[in-house]
Amino acid sequence: MGRRRASSTERRNLDKRYAFTPAAAVFDNRLNRTDLVVLVLMGTYATPDRPAFPYATDLAKTLGINADTVRRSIKRLESCKYLTRTTYNGRNAWSMATTAADCHDLPDELRRSTPW
């Protein structure tokens, strides 16, 4: 069975959003490409006043990947301090990290020489 891609309506809704993403994440060798895409997509759900609280299944459907893969990426992003788990209106939610926003703050041993 092939991967399901986001519908044209879902893509149009995403086209109207911007995402805050820590620059250090691009150079962090602990993260893979899926982690980065999940982080950027999570950033489209967050606002300065409100954390992101999408379901993993919704993220997976938008990205055309398995929900378990999204959950693994979220756990990795939490362990690397790019996301912080919290609750919002009784649901799991994630705040975007701002402390690691500058790629120059990343220790050399965790830094990729190039993003890809």
Image: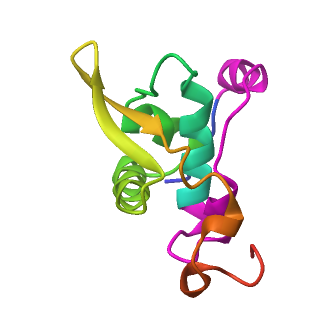
Q: Magenta stretch containing residue 22, yes or no?
A: yes
Give the color scheme: rainbow, by chain, secondary structure or one colour. Answer: rainbow
Indicate left or right for 56 with 105 as reference.
left
Q: Quadrant of residue 102?
A: bottom right
In front of the other: 14 or 114: 114
Relative height, residue 109 to residue 54 (above, below): below
> How many numbered discs, if any?
0
Q: Which residue sits at x=61%, y=52%?
A: 37
| 64 relative to 24, above or below | above
Q: Position of residue 38 (x, y in %)?
A: 54, 48
Whether residue 31 appears in magenta in the rendering, the answer is yes
Above or below, 19 relative to 15: below
- Residue 42 is situated, as x and y percent measured from the top left of the image, at 53, 37
Q: Residue at x 45, y 31 (%)?
A: 58
Task: Give the residue furthest to the top.
Answer: 89
Relative image position of residue 54 (x, y in whole percent): 43, 28
Residue 41 picture quarter? top right
Residue 111 lies, with reference to residue 20, above or below; the image says below
Quadrant showing the C terminus: bottom right
Q: Position of residue 110 (x, y in %)?
A: 55, 80
Q: Residue at x 49, y 37 (%)?
A: 59
Residue interval drawn in magenta:
7-34
